[in-house]
Image (spheres, rainbow, N blue to C red):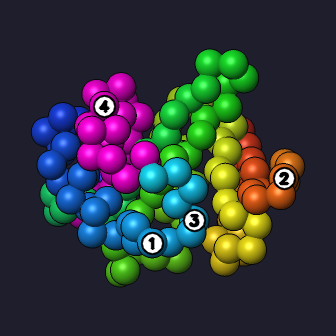
Amino acid sequence: MKIQLATILYKKQVIEFFEKYLDKNNEAITWREFLCPFGVSNAIKRNQVMIVLEEDEIVWAVRFYPRKRDNIVSVYQFAISENYRKKGLLRKMLEKTWYKIFEVVCPLNHSFNKYYLKTWWKIEKSDEKFNYLILKIWKDQ
């Protein structure tokens, strides 16, 4: 298993992977723009997509955006093929980036909240619609 930044060579594969594993009707997709293939393509060009490869096939992908205002990285979307779930890969992928603090936005009553809380994310704040969860990764300097 290999974890790496997606390069433009993987653009088509990444777009197809997200299309296959992201349910467009899932309420955890907070903004429809996350499903846009042009957005995924641009994120790859900006080095903002990590992938896990197993024998040159993508089995995990995460798209993220580092915010300039506070150095927190927004995790836009992630997907995993069925055989690789429950292995802690999201955290391992985020550890491979050069960032330390990550945020996800999750609808208040969505089951993903349980997933995040079981995997070391903490609720930073909530509003009438969403929980904003933070994951801090401390790396050796």
Given the image, on which type of amino acid does mark 4 rest? Asn
Residue 79 or 39: which is nearer the viewer? 39
10 Å crowding of disc 3: few (<14), some (14-19), many (20+): many
**Residue at which label 4 appears:** 42
Q: Earlier in the sequence, mark 3 or mark 4?
A: 3
Q: Earlier in the sequence, mark 4 or mark 1?
A: 1
Q: Earlier in the sequence, mark 1 or mark 2?
A: 1
Residue 89 or 112: which is nearer the viewer? 112
Given the image, on which type of amino acid does mark 1 rest? Asn
10 Å crowding of disc 2: few (<14), some (14-19), many (20+): few
137 vs 57, left or right, is right
The answer for how far apart the CA atoms under marks 1 and 3 are is 9 Å
Q: Earlier in the sequence, mark 4 or mark 2?
A: 4
10 Å crowding of disc 1: few (<14), some (14-19), many (20+): few
**Residue 61 in the image, given as x and y percentages of width and height:** 37, 55
**Residue at which label 1 appears:** 25
Residue interval drawn in magenta:
33-54
Residue 52 or 36: which is nearer the viewer? 36
**Residue at which label 2 appears:** 127
Numbered circles on residues, count? 4
In the image, residue 106 sits, relative to residue 113, either above or below, namely above
The structure residue drawn at horizontal position 43% and vertical position 48%, both measured from the top left corner, is 34
Q: Secondary structure at mark 1?
A: loop
Task: State the quadrant of the C terminus.
Answer: top right
Q: Secondary structure at mark 4?
A: helix
Given the image, on which type of amino acid does mark 3 rest? Ala
The answer for how far apart the CA atoms under marks 1 and 2 are is 22 Å
In the image, residue 41 sits, relative to residue 29, either above or below, namely above
Task: State the quadrant of the N terminus.
Answer: bottom left
The answer for how far apart the CA atoms under marks 4 and 2 are is 30 Å
**Residue at which label 3 appears:** 28
